Image (spheres, rainbow, N blue to C red):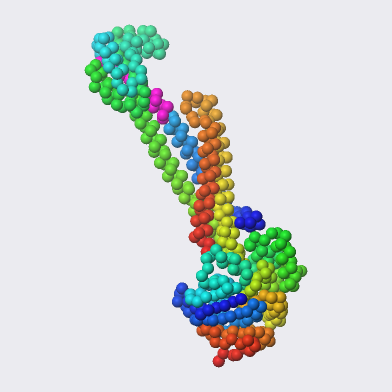
């Protein structure tokens, strides 16, 4: 395509966008909404997975022992547990230590007397694992050992978090797919309207020997522009709110392991722009193929 | 310039428009196509600028067969052919100058070349003073002149016209015919479909009469016989 033709194509795309201003605006807005949701979903999912992983790796297994075990039996148990695969550390908290710790945390030194001299705390062994996925396996093995009354770990919480993020992922994908379809269809409709409104012009272009690409490209460029403008608006919105939220979380909820890598954020935002452009291109190319008979 | 060899056209709906048409038009000729409505004049005209494709036979323009041609070559062929219509087909939102310049822009001519060629051709058709007017501000004759200017601006070797005076009064029609005659004298081959008997009788050009999809008469002297 010559420089003159390229100039013509670009001018026509912009003229067309302006001519169908409201429809173009609607298309841009839906692209923006769908990409905004994509952006937020990506950041939300990445962060929840990150949080889930961090919490998972911090899971401890608490082994409560039968009453009246001898100290030697407890040491035996401890060494047996230490030999299990995936066990990182094993720490023993005797019932005496437990009540003292509890008393200290309550700020009282007469708790044992208040309870009538009976220490309700069992002896306890705390296990940390090298891999969160081994927690269940270790738990069931430890349950079978003699002298063990019951075994507890953050039962439920980790699973719930994982299930929640998975569920969220599917909902996210569903919502994003719906909006992506809506944007696609709106761009298709937009380009179709433009093709129809320029029917006479296209007829004359064909008659005087304009090449097919010269007739098609203004529409395709227009689709790409719609996609990119929508994407840039979405990037501005998502980028600004995410960085604001990051700063807020880091200053107030510093224990939450949020993803704050600049490179990661830039990559996501760049992908959004590319996604918008690709969506615009595909939708307009589809529309041109379907509605523009050359 | 134009050679039709045993050309037939049957539309997809089964309508038979042309049968076994053979035709030779030399470079620089001026040819009228006459015949009743539905005889096949418009179909023949459309075959010439490849708006329609012959079902059988060959349509050769400058020895290029339009029947067997990849669609990517069609634009190049159309640049050699100017087309004018009864209803002008001007773009209402563009001025006369823009309408004519459009034909140059879309084949990739530079702004400078476009401006020069457009001004030259508007001079030729006598619309230089109206170049900034919109089609709605022009008379029918002026609109047809603008349409002719657009058809000629790419300097085609062949000008095809489908009833170009069909919407014009007698005086205006004559002025358009004088213009077409002038263009023909400058070297452009002209093929014109028409109903207007007075034009054919006075122009004294070659007349090809089509009836029910066949050429029934080809008179070099320009005599027009009434179909009985």
Q: In this view, which residue lies farthest toward the front?
A: B63
Q: Position of residue B3 (x, y in %)?
A: 57, 78
Residue B95 picture quarter: bottom right
Q: Position of residue B197 (x, y in %)?
A: 63, 86
Q: In this view, which residue lies farthest toward the right?
A: B129
Residue B55 in the magenta stretch? The answer is no
- The boundaries of the magenta stretch are A52-66
Q: Classify residue A100 as left or right of residue B114.
A: left
Q: Nearer the viewer, residue A256 or B96?
A: B96
**Is any atom of residue B147 visible in this view?**
no
Residue name at image x 59 percent, y 86 percent: B218
**Is any atom of residue A125 visible in this view?**
yes
Q: Nearer the viewer, residue B187 or A58?
A: B187
Residue B127 picture quarter: bottom right
Q: Is residue B200 above or below residue A179?
A: below
Q: Nearer the viewer, residue A73 or B64?
A: B64
Q: Is residue A234 above or below residue A251?
A: below
Residue name at image x 53 percent, y 54 percent: A284
Q: Nearer the viewer, residue A252 or A130?
A: A130
Q: Classify residue B186 as left or right of residue A151.
A: right
**Quadrant for the C terminus of chain A in the image:** bottom right
Q: In this view, which residue lies farthest toward the bottom?
A: B228
């Amino acid at each position: 395509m010559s420089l003159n033709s390229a100039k013509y194509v670009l001018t026509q795309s912009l003229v067309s966008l302006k001519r169908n201003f409201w429809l173009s605006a609607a298309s841009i807005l839906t692209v923006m909404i769908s990409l905004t949701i994509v952006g937020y979903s990506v950041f939300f999912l990445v962060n929840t997975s990150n949080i889930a992983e961090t919490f998972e790796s911090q899971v401890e297994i608490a082994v409560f022992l039968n009453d009246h075990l001898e100290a030697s039996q407890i040491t035996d148990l401890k060494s047996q547990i230490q030999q299990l695969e995936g066990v990182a550390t094993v720490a023993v908290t005797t019932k005496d230590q437990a009540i003292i710790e509890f008393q200290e945390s309550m700020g009282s030194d007469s708790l044992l007397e208040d309870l009538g001299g009976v220490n309700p705390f069992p002896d306890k062994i705390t296990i940390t694992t090298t891999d969160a996925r081994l927690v269940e396996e270790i738990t069931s093995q430890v349950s079978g050992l003699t002298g063990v009354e019951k075994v507890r770990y953050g039962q439920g919480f980790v699973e719930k978090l994982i299930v929640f993020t998975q569920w969220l992922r599917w909902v996210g994908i569903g919502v994003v797919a719906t909006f992506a379809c809506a944007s696609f269809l709106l761009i298709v409709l937009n380009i179709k309207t433009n093709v129809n409104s320029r029917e006479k012009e296209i007829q004359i272009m064909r008659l005087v020997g304009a090449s097919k690409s010269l007739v098609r490209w203004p529409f395709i460029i227009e689709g790409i522009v719609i996609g990119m403008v929508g994407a840039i608006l979405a990037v501005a919105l998502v980028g600004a709110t995410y960085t604001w939220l990051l700063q807020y979380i880091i200053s107030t909820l510093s224990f939450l392991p949020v993803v704050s890598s600049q490179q990661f954020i830039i990559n996501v935002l760049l992908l959004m722009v590319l996604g918008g452009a690709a969506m615009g291109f595909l939708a307009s190319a589809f529309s041109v193929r379907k509605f523009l008979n050359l | 310039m134009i050679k039709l060899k045993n050309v037939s056209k049957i539309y997809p709906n089964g309508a038979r428009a042309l049968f076994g048409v053979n035709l030779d038009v030399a470079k620089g000729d001026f040819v009228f196509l006459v015949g009743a409505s539905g005889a096949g004049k418009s179909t023949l005209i459309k075959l010439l600028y490849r708006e329609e494709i012959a079902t059988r036979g060959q349509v050769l323009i400058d020895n290029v067969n339009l029947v067997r041609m990849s669609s990517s070559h069609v634009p190049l062929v159309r640049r050699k052919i100017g087309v004018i219509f009864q209803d002008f087909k001007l773009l209402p939102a563009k001025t006369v100058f823009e309408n004519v310049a459009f034909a140059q822009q879309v084949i990739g001519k530079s702004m400078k070349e476009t401006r020069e060629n457009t001004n030259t051709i508007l001079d030729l058709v006598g619309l230089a003073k109206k170049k900034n007017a919109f089609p709605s501000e022009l008379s029918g004759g002026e609109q047809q002149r603008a349409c002719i200017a657009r058809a000629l601006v790419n300097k085609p070797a062949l000008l095809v016209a489908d009833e170009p005076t069909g919407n014009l009064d007698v005086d205006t029609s004559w002025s358009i015919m004088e213009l077409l005659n002038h263009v023909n004298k400058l070297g452009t081959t002209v093929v014109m479909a028409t109903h207007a008997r007075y034009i054919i009788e006075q122009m004294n050009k070659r007349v090809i009469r089509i009836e029910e999809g066949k050429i029934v008469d080809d008179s070099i002297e320009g005599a027009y016989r009434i179909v009985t």
